[in-house]
Image (cartoon, rainbow, N blue to C red):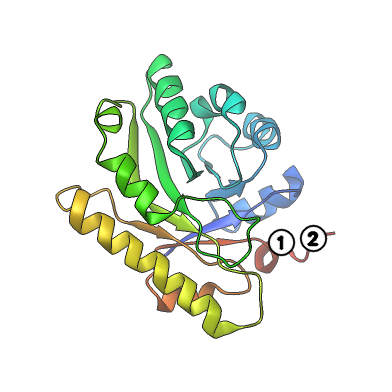
């Protein structure tokens, strides 16, 4: 059971429009995609009150097409990417809502900031000059493993990062409040460690075909 204060993002990547509508008709309004083109195609055809979250690795050359249509970019994994997002959001008169993605897993294939890298960015004049984005928290993915204690340790690490950034840079910023962690296999552990947003696919839609 997911507590009421935790937002459920239904991960709809590879799912058909009919499958998404089926979930929509049960009350889901927050959907997550990891490919820009797939998100844009679905966004055009599905109900306009769906809140789309981008959760995959985002290439800078795809930012312009994505920014006008997405409610949140959860996977900001570099300063370079954030600068492009800010520029494109300003160009189309929007404020891009973002989370900073941190690398917390033991797997090298995962993307994300290191904590010292993120702090260096947040303390830079170049960051302070950005005007068209809103950082609302952090995101991370734990190692894909059955080792629950390792996963818990990684989620606790991300929670510590969130608290550090909140207290040092965002203490008086009420919208810096999201800790996005936890997927179908580990969301209970994530919630126990303070997650405010879980990204769940297979439990909602069934195993990937």
- Indicate the position of residue 4 as horizontal and vertical percent values: 39, 68
Image quadrant for the C terminus? bottom right
Mark 2 vs mark 1: give the one in front.
Answer: 2
- Is any part of residue 118 visible from this angle? yes
* Mark 2 lies on residue: 208
- Categorize mark 1 by other alpha carbons within 10 Å: few (<14), some (14-19), many (20+): some
Q: Quadrant of residue 98?
A: top left
Residue 205 badge: 1
Q: Which is more toward the observer, 96 or 69? A: 96
Helix, strand or loop at disc 2? Answer: loop
Q: State how far apart marks 2 and 1 are (Cα).
A: 8 Å
**Location of residue 189 with respect to 59 vertically, above or below:** below
Q: Which is more toward the observer, 167 or 124? A: 124
Residue at 57% x, 47% y is 55
- Categorize mark 2 by other alpha carbons within 10 Å: few (<14), some (14-19), many (20+): few
| Residue at the limit of the structure toward the top, as seen here | 91
Q: Which is more toward the observer, 16 or 60? A: 60
Q: Are marks 2 and 1 in contact (CB under 8 Å)?
A: no
Left or right of residue 174: residue 4? right
- Indicate the position of residue 25 as horizontal and vertical percent values: 61, 53
| Residue at the limit of the structure toward the right, as seen here | 209
- Is any part of residue 170 visible from this angle? no
Q: Which is more toward the observer, 21 or 132? A: 132
**Location of residue 78 with respect to 192 vertically, above or below:** above
Residue at 29% x, 26% y is 131
| Residue at the limit of the structure toward the left, as seen here | 172
- Indicate the position of residue 6 as horizontal and vertical percent values: 41, 65
- Indicate the position of residue 71 as horizontal and vertical percent values: 46, 38
């Amino acid at each position: 059971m997911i507590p009421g204060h935790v937002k459920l993002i239904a991960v709809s990547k590879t799912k058909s429009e009919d499958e998404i509508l089926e979930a929509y008709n049960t009350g889901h309004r927050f959907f997550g995609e990891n490919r820009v083109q797939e998100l844009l195609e679905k966004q055009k055809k599905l109900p306009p009150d769906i809140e789309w979250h981008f959760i995959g690795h985002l290439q800078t050359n795809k930012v312009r097409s994505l920014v006008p249509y997405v409610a949140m970019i959860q996977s900001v994994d570099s300063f370079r990417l954030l600068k492009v997002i800010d520029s494109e959001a300003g160009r189309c008169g929007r404020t891009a809502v973002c989370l900073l993605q941190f690398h917390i897993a033991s797997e090298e294939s995962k993307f994300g900031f290191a904590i010292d890298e993120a702090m260096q960015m947040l303390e830079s004049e170049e960051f302070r000059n950005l005007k068209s984005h809103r950082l609302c928290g952090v995101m991370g993915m734990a190692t894909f493993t059955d080792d629950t204690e390792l996963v818990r340790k990684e989620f606790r690490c991300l929670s510590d990062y969130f608290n550090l950034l909140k207290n040092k840079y965002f203490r008086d910023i009420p919208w810096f409040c999201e800790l996005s962690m936890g997927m179908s296999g580990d969301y209970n552990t994530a919630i126990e460690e303070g997650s405010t947003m879980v990204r769940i696919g297979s439990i909602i839609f069934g195993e990937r075909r």
